[in-house]
Image (cartoon, helix red, strand yellow):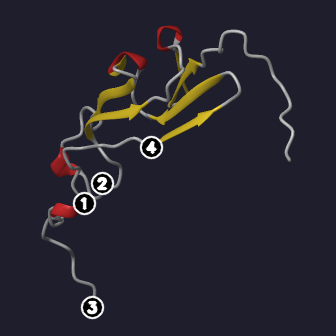
Amino acid sequence: SDVQPVEAPMPSLPEQTRPGPVYSPAVDIFETSESVVVAAELPGLSAEEIEVRIADNALTLKGERKLEKGIQQENYHRIERSYGSFSRTFPLPSGVKTSEALAEYKLGVLHIRIPKAREAGAKPMRISIS
């Protein structure tokens, strides 16, 4: 028969496919009429594994995404998902009430809503264009 059995073990993963020390979650930041919203993709983490801090008008997200327990890295054939510690800091626009920020984690996405401060006595008005 022309088919030869494979006797050698699979080669180890090339270095570029192994998980690196840094995982960087994707983040969207947008504004609504009432608040600034930060949405971060953090699949596979529990809310307890995510740290959210606001200081000096900046929002910081920290955590670590770990390889699945019970599986040794050398037993993987392919690793495409990223793992490791992360820390991302984003400046916040002025005029937000950081003390009233709320966070909700659902289906692997963290949403942080930071209300905008209303200007005292400011009323909506139309501005004419000359």
Task: Check disc 1 and report its element: helix, strand or loop.
Answer: helix
Residue 46 vs 80, above or below: the answer is above
Residue at the limit of the structure toward the front, as seen here: 130
Question: In the rendered image, which residue does mark 3 sit on?
Answer: 2
Amino acid at pointer 4: Ala
Circle nearer the N terminus (3, 2): 3
Task: Check disc 2 and report its element: helix, strand or loop.
Answer: loop
Question: In the rendered image, which residue does mark 1 sit on?
Answer: 17
**1 and 3 marks in contact (CB < 8 Å):** no
Residue 52 vs 67, above or below: the answer is above
**Residue 76 position in % (x across, y down):** 25, 52
Q: Label 4 to label 2, Cα distance in Å?
A: 19 Å
Quarter of image, res 77? bottom left
- Label disc, if present, on residue 81 of the rendered structure: none
Circle nearer the N terminus (1, 3): 3
> What residue appears at the point 86 percent right and 47 percent down from the top-left corner?
130
Left or right: 116 as drawn, with respect to 103: right
Res 59 visible: yes
Q: Label 3 to label 2, Cα distance in Å?
A: 32 Å
Q: Nearer the viewer, residue 104 or 44?
A: 104
Circle nearer the N terminus (1, 4): 1
**1 and 2 marks in contact (CB < 8 Å):** yes
Amino acid at pointer 1: Thr
Res 13 visible: no
Circle nearer the N terminus (4, 2): 4
**Residue 34 position in % (x across, y down):** 68, 21
Give the crowd class for mark 4: few <14, some 14-19, many >=20 residues within 10 Å: few
Question: In the rendered image, which residue does mark 2 sit on?
Answer: 79
Q: Label 1 to label 2, Cα distance in Å?
A: 6 Å
Question: In the rendered image, which residue does mark 4 sit on?
Answer: 26
**Residue 32 position in % (x across, y down):** 68, 30
> What residue appears at the point 35 percent right and 49 percent down from the top-left corner?
81
